Image (spheres, rainbow, N blue to C red):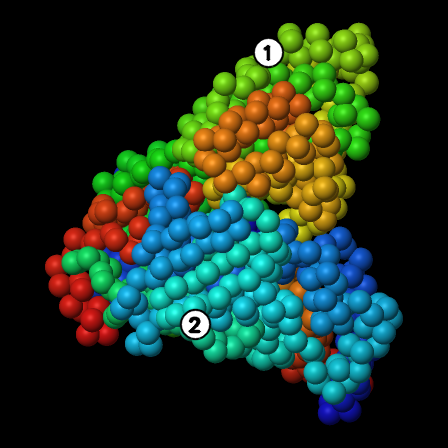
Amino acid sequence: MAMISKPAVARMLALALCGSVALGCNRPKIGHPAGEIQVDIESSPTSTDPRFATDAISSRINELVFESLVKIGPDGQFVNDLAQSYERPDPKTLIFHLRHGVRFSDGRKLTARDIKFTYDSILDPDSMSPKRAGMKELASISAPDDYTIVMTTRHPYAPALEMAMQGIVPAGAPLPAAAMSAGPVGSGPFRMLSYKRDESVELARNPFHPAPPEAPGAILFKVVPDPTVRALELAEGQCDLSENNIEASVLPWLADHPELRVSNTPGTTYKYLMFNFRDPSLRDLRVRRAIAYAIDRQAIVTSVLHGTARVATGMLSPENWAYYGEVTDYGYDPAAACRLLDQAGYPARHDGMRNLRFEYKTTPEGARLAEVLQAMLKRVGITLNVRILEWATFYGDIQRGSFQLASLQWVGIDDPNFYYMTFDSSMTPPGMNRGYYSNPKMDALVRTGERTLDLAARRQIYQQVQMLAASDLPYVSLWWVDTVAVMNRSLSGFAPYPNGSLRSLADLTIARPGAIEEAARR
Amino acid sequence: MIWYVLRRLATLVPVALGVVTLTFALIHLVPGDPVVAMLGDTASPADIAGMRHRLGLDRPILVQYVDFLGGLAHGDLGESISYHQPVSRLIAERFPATLELAGAGLLVAMVIAFPLGFIAGAKPGSAGDVGSMGFAIVGISIPHIYLGPLLMIWFSLDLGLLPLTGRGGIPHLVLPAVTLGTALAAVLARMLRQSIIQVRDSDYMRTAVSKGLSPTLALFRHGLRNALTPVVTLLGLELGGLLTGALITEIIFSWPGLGRMLISAISARDYPLVEGAVLTFALTYVFVNMATDVVYALVDPRVSLR
């Protein structure tokens, strides 16, 4: 993967890129068939079957091919998809009434039987679907008629609608899908024409799904692992759109290109610094707070990220309905950091350093941030030993809780129940509470939040959760990453989602005369 | 020569055994779990255990190793964990692209190196020599990761002559091949220059010139073949570098080769695919070295293969 993406090389290339502008870039290009757009992606989707796909790229593409009962809209709220409406007659039951006339891309009618089959095949232990664990609260699913689905949960379960975001495949779709071929058909705006792992995924319009006039007839998702090459493909006109995978340092150069438009939208991807509470010094709240005060997050956002992020107050971004921002603020204050470290029993030596040495694990892509954090912590006397690991090794260590300090990001946080997954003391590794944070008060709050269905009451609960998280500091909230899309000016109507979804590819239009007709002839 | 080739082929067995044993040990030693990579964060311990059992990863490591060797003896490299396809089929699909790239890189290297080395060696100290060796220094110094995008900027972005990425005919092959072949061209050119300088001072060259041949023609007709012997040796040795260089080049140019697949397989801890791909690269290296020895004998009649 992007193992070769070295920041220094990227900087050198940025200079070379700027130098090449003068020579002109409007030469004839090797183009695509009219009506087809190319979207560059950084890694290959791992599965074309929505019952098995868990990685972000697979999910983004599958959202265009498969529909679900409900989906997340551009404003982060649930909206109906296959469901025309839904009701919650009691705390453990959800009843969905389906739209009529929906067809899979092969012409078959989509009915409740297909939905029940999809869920049953995930819940079948033999399927080994990675989605099964996320549906452990689902007690049963039934289809009383062709247009009604009844879901019951084991307990009153507030985030139950998240389980209704599963992409639907036709009844009888075999398990497991062969990874080298196009997956099962769906009822979404596109159908999958081909899937070449590590190369490309080609989608064409689903003839049974309405499309806006002048919409692209086909989308080629091309796997381009190198970030510099993705920028070059945009500049050359080979690629029409790239989202969240262009290096910030190259964005100004692309923005100057007359044929390109850079769109910057507030995003929900949350970047954080994680502490391991099994480390005695990091268990001390004063040390964690000192580290938070020592990091100049605004300076990093401005200079390293070129303004493509917002300093975060917590896991939930302001776009989330449960967001609460009036929490303990850790503005850059090295003097406060030094005071806290003195109080914690780590006085500065004559050279300014303290008896505090931590190991910070990261990947090659995170090396630059590691250098910045190392320099900032050194200012308050903390030594940070940076260990750069290959991704699988790094991730293996994180999942086992084998680290002192590490920074990662959470993508696609929709329901605040995510706090339960990450901060409840029962969720330590192999669960997602990898820092072994434990506070009975937090446990009580997140467990109540999971069982409370009333929205106003939930909002109150998560307000307390966010205040407690900012005060206890299991994570230092770094920033929310913006959704940055670079696209050809001939495209219009693309509305970036805060969570990075590419759903609006279905609604954009291209200003090329005759494009749709030519695509249809193909 | 036939006996020599057969004997060298027989040595492939211990080489292959060594490679698979080492690869098997290393990939199992490094941290990371293919099942966790596959099932993700939310998988329950029971699901993880179930998948480990299904893939046979819960068996003792020695049993897994013996099973793998048993399959290998029957030509079965197993099934890829992440691609759900037989490893041999995946290699058959991807390796031709890597060979195509490496072959083209080799060709580019020779096309650049031979004239440059000859010009530099024929008249040491001349402008041609300085220019050729200047190229060699730049070629050796510039890494693929920098040269590739620079060529893209010049030839695709600015001049619009060649496609940026992907595989599909000669136009797509040019930039990756030049990226891959430039460093090798630089090494070969320097070696050929040195070799030609040594040859041009030999007695038989003086004899040829004294009989009326021009120095350049004498060098071309009589000296070049002798000067090529160390270059051919180097070519074989450098092939390993060409194959490993292809891994990076494949990523830069989105080239669908085995190297790129190997890197994905390492990230996913896809044990069978890593073992199969590494074995393929290793055997290719051995084959090419064997071929080099044969060519060595053809180029220099004084060398006999025993």
- Residue of label 2: A113
Q: Quadrant of residue A132?
A: bottom right
Mark 2 surroundings: few (<14), some (14-19) or many (≥20) residues within 10 A: some
Q: Chain of mark 1?
A: A
Q: Residue at x 16, y 58 (%)?
A: A213
Q: Nearer the viewer, residue B60 or A238?
A: B60
Q: Residue at x 49, y 71 (%)?
A: A117
* Left or right of residue B68, residue B277 in this image: left
- Measure the C-alpha gap from mark 2 to mark 1: 59 Å
| Residue A267 in the image, given as x and y percentages of width and height | 42, 36
| Residue B32 in the image, given as x and y percentages of width and height | 72, 54
Q: Nearer the viewer, residue A50 or A126?
A: A126
Q: Chain of mark 2?
A: A
Secondary structure category for the residue under label 2: helix
Which residue extends farthest front?
A90
| Image quarter (top left, top right, bottom left or bottom right) of the N terminus of chain B | bottom right
Residue A228 in the image: above or below residue A386: below
Mark 1 surroundings: few (<14), some (14-19) or many (≥20) residues within 10 A: some
Residue A106 in the image: above or below residue A432: below
- Residue of label 1: A333
| Residue A206 in the image, given as x and y percentages of width and height | 29, 68
The type of residue carrying mark 2 is Arg
Which residue extends farthest bottom?
B2
* Left or right of residue B89, residue B160 in this image: left
Q: Nearer the viewer, residue A415 or B238?
A: A415
Secondary structure category for the residue under label 1: loop
